[in-house]
């Protein structure tokens, strides 16, 4: 007589453990990936806000690169290259001003939203909210700028 089919054979707990372990590894991988993506996104946003107001931006780097590419690919003379680079530099300057205005508008919108939220909160929660807001703005590179 053959042995009856019993689902509770000794291999079943090992198989179950393997699935649980695989699921745990998957969940851990998703969590680590999400945390890394969030960190990279946060750093990118912070850098974007700070560079828009201070540092050289994409437009300046692009103007230099395009100027060098055009000089070599079109075999421009020195005079032609200077004129082309001048146009590119003027365009980069206008783009930088546009980016700066957009960054200031974005910050102004954030400030307005913060003030509106602060106005609808009860006084005991408003102080804690303003502290949280100051900390977040500090992390974004806008120290000392809190809601009014």
Image (cartoon, rainbow, N blue to C red):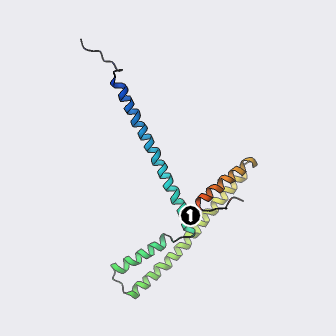
Quarter that holds the N terminus = top left
Quarter that holds the C terminus = bottom right
Which residue is painted at 41% across and 75% down in the image?
Answer: 66
Q: From what the image shows, is residue 90 above or below residue 130?
A: below
Q: From what the image shows, is residue 65 above or below residue 144?
A: below
* Near-viewer residue (33 or 91): 33
The residue singled out by tag 1 in the image is 49
User: Counting other residues with Cα less than 10 Å from the Cα at mark 1, is it few (<14), some (14-19), or many (20 or more)?
Assistant: many
Outermost residue to the bottom? 79
Q: Position of residue 3 (x, y in %)?
A: 27, 15
* Near-viewer residue (95 or 39): 39
Q: From what the image shows, is residue 106 above or below residue 34?
A: below
Instruction: Tell me the element at label 1.
Output: helix
Q: Position of residue 120 (x, y in %)?
A: 72, 50
5 left or right, relative to 146: left
131 left or right, relative to 24: right
How many numbered markers are drawn?
1
């Amino acid at each position: 007589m053959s042995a009856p089919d019993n689902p509770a054979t000794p291999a079943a707990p090992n198989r179950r453990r393997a699935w649980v372990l695989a699921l745990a590894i998957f969940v851990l991988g998703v969590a680590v990936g999400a945390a890394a993506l969030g960190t990279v996104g946060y750093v990118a946003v912070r850098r974007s806000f700070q560079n828009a107001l201070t540092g050289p931006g994409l437009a300046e780097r692009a103007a230099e690169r395009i100027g060098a590419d055009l000089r070599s690919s079109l075999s421009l003379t020195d005079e032609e290259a200077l004129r082309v680079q001048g146009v590119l530099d003027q365009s980069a300057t206008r783009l930088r001003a546009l980016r700066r205005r957009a960054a200031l508008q974005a910050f102004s919108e954030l400030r307005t939203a913060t003030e509106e939220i602060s106005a609808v909160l009860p006084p005991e929660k408003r102080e804690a909210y303003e502290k949280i807001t100051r900390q977040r703005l500090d992390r974004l590179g806008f120290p000392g700028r809190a809601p009014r």
